[in-house]
Amino acid sequence: MKKIATLLTLLLLLPALAAGCGSSAIKEESTDETVEEDLITVGFSQLGAESDWRNTNTISMQEAFTRDNGFNLVYKNGQQKQANQITAVRMFIQQGVDYIVLAPATETGWESVLTEARDAGIPVILVDRRVDVADKTLFSCWVGSDFELESKKMTEWLRKLTEVRNISPEELHIVNIQGTMGSTAQIGRTRGLANAARENGWDLITEVSGDFTENKGREVMAAMLKGYDNINVVYCENDNMAIGAIDALEAAGKRVGPNIKNGEVMVVSFDGVNEKSLEYCREGKISCIAECNPLHGPRVRALIEALDKGETPETFNYVDEKIFSSLNTVKSVTVDGIEYSVEEP
Ligand code: AHR
């Protein structure tokens, strides 16, 4: 299965994009002709560098696919544009890599290029987000998070907290700062909140995308505050947007915290990767974080090693994730019959 190939490999070290919780550096790429012997060549199309989660994920992949581990990694950053990712996958096909790993920005629009990869006999492994294709044989397997489950844990935590604090459902006025529209993370987290709001009778005022970035989280929150004066819960679909939203709330003179009966605005979010957001969670500025685990490098490597031995891994591989809050009011949440303890951040 493993090919010994002469490749144009891509490796140029640019200054590090610091990872949120690590000291490693993300390595960007350039061209250099080298002969790779006895290495498995993996082309990795990462979608971008929009968040601390993403940077930590990139480093995890780069640390897993080293020459010492038997791999030649060809890494391409898609800069948040699907067109760039499609170009990268086509380049990997031309180069004749052994495996393609794709972290897709959004779910749709992948049929053609994945068909080209399959026609070239190159297995595709999806990581983090998924693709929406009718033909499920266009990829070998996927590893990532259950984004809707993350949201169900979060909304159950909110339901229990408000019940214990005697806050009635109609008193909750929620805004959602969404992630990149059409991404699996956004779809799952938005659906989870919409379902919970409907089931519990919460007022879901509005939903606007902040594209998973801190700056857009700040901008969207500032605009929402101009449009609505009764917001008391801000559901941010990642921590970077929560950090931006908290800036905007405080700049507008709002107090951020869990005591909405006393006029505070509660912020909840997803990831648990960024040290600043964990610190905010310890302080109570972020009331709850549903973990989204980015450390997929070793998981993807294990999948490729299995495929390389001729094995057939499970198609969908979910990672276990936690939920964090420094409020000790809610000790655990039960979702779909499974109890998750709420941990200290
Ligand atoms: O797809 C995972 C999400 O993408 C993370 O929650 C977010 O921070 C990232 O940008």
Image (cartoon, grey):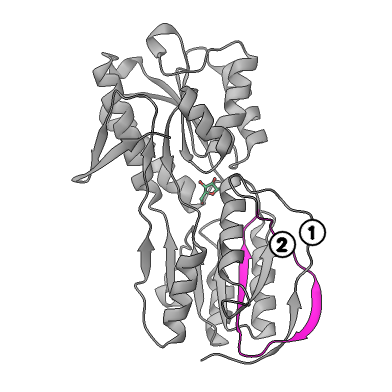
Determine the residue positioned at 71% across, 62% down: 27
Q: Is mark 2 within 8 Å of ligand 1?
A: no
Q: In this view, does 311 lie above or below 336?
A: below
Please identify the quarter of the rendering in which residue 114 is found: bottom right
Whole-percent x and y of residue 293? 46, 51
User: Could you tell whether 345 is left or right of 8 in the image?
Assistant: left
Q: Give the residue drawn at x 58%, y 42%.
A: 212
Tell me the crowding category of disc 1: few under 14, some 14 to 19, or many 20 or more residues within 10 angstroms, Cα based: few
Q: In the image, is 249 to the left or to the right of 266?
A: right
User: Magenta region: which residues?
Assistant: 24-48
* For residue 148, above or below residue 264: below
Which residue corresponds to mark 2?
27
Q: What element carries label 1?
A: loop
Q: Which amino acid does label 1 sit on?
A: Leu
Mark drawn on residue 164: none
Query: Along the line of sight, which residue is nearer the eye, 36 or 88?
Result: 36
Q: Any magenta on residue 35? A: yes
The residue shown at (56%, 46%) is: 180
Where residue 310 appears, as percent x and y from the top left, is: 41, 88
Mark 1 in CB contact with mark 2 (< 8 angstroms):
yes
**Which amino acid type is shown beneath numbered disc 2?**
Lys
Q: Position of residue 50 (x, y in %)?
A: 64, 47
Q: How far apart are marks 1 and 2 (CA)?
A: 6 Å
Side of 32 relative to 96 (left or right):
right
Pointer 1 residue: 14
Q: Which of marks 1 and 2 is nearer the N terminus?
A: 1
- Residue 106, given in percent of the width and then of the height, sits at 55, 56
Quarter of the image containing the C terminus?
top left
